[in-house]
Image (cartoon, rainbow, N blue to C red):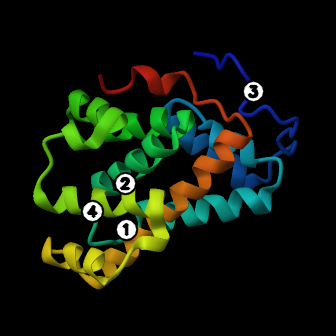
Amino acid sequence: MTNPKPPTALDLPMVDPLPEATQKYFDICMDKLGMIPNVLQANAFDIDKLNAFTAMYNDLMLADSGLSKLEREMIAVVVSSINKCFYCLVAHGAAVRQLSGDPMLGEMMVMNYRVAPLDTRQRAMLDFAAKMTTASATIEEPDRQALRDAGFSDRDIWDIANVAGFFNMTNRVASATAMWPNEEYHAQHR
């Protein structure tokens, strides 16, 4: 498929030619995903910004954590749903469908996570991420204690807060620049 639009509404062309390491990373994306995610293309106007973005994303979403990859993607979807970020809902909704093996769960998460069949741990994590998105200044010790009571360590709480914080930031950048999701995401894992 081809994208109907450029990655964003901004006229920021990718560096050309891409540095060898960046081109290799994009080639790996093509091999593994069948596409170069538009968020990467959008950041490729400045290789330092692209590298900073990918380093933070990879650390938060792929590094060792008490949170599973699915749980981190669920946080991304809940935050993006509240923020109405089209790009992230499409991209991370596809990831939830893939990682869970449940297309319905992916759809429920995009629309309203509260209707999804979640366990107590996931519900507590997502309620915290939702509160952090809508009213972070109101978070108090009982909110953190609810996570501990659901089985999260303090390190896990740090990871929940950082994943939610990252997607609150990227949602705002994606919305402000009219970042468009790759078409391929729409049909994945249904």
How far apart marks 3 and 4 lie (CA) works out to 35 Å
Q: The disc labelled 4 sits on which kind of residue?
A: Met
Q: Earlier in the sequence, mark 3 or mark 2?
A: 3
Q: Earlier in the sequence, mark 3 or mark 4?
A: 3
Mark 4–mark 1 CB contact (< 8 Å) = yes
At mark 4, the secondary structure is helix
Question: Residue sitting at 20 percent across and 32 percent down?
Answer: 102
Write down the residue under mark 3. Answer: 6
Mark 1–mark 2 CB contact (< 8 Å) = yes
At mark 1, the secondary structure is helix
How far apart marks 3 and 2 lie (CA) works out to 27 Å
Give residue 125's mark.
4
Determine whether, in the image, residue 48 is placed left or right of residue 3: right
Question: Residue sitting at 57 percent across and 15 percent down?
Answer: 1
Question: Residue sitting at 59 percent across and 38 percent down?
Answer: 37
Q: Earlier in the sequence, mark 4 or mark 1?
A: 4
Determine whether, in the image, residue 81 is placed left or right of residue 43: left
Write down the residue under mark 1. Answer: 160
Q: How many marks?
A: 4
At mark 2, the secondary structure is helix
Pointer 1 local density, CA inside 10 Å: few below 14, some 14–19, many at least 20:
many
How far apart marks 4 and 1 lie (CA) works out to 7 Å
Mark 2–mark 4 CB contact (< 8 Å) = yes
Q: The disc labelled 1 sits on which kind of residue?
A: Ile
How far apart marks 2 and 4 lie (CA) works out to 8 Å
Q: Earlier in the sequence, mark 1 or mark 2?
A: 2
| Viewer can see residue 97 | no
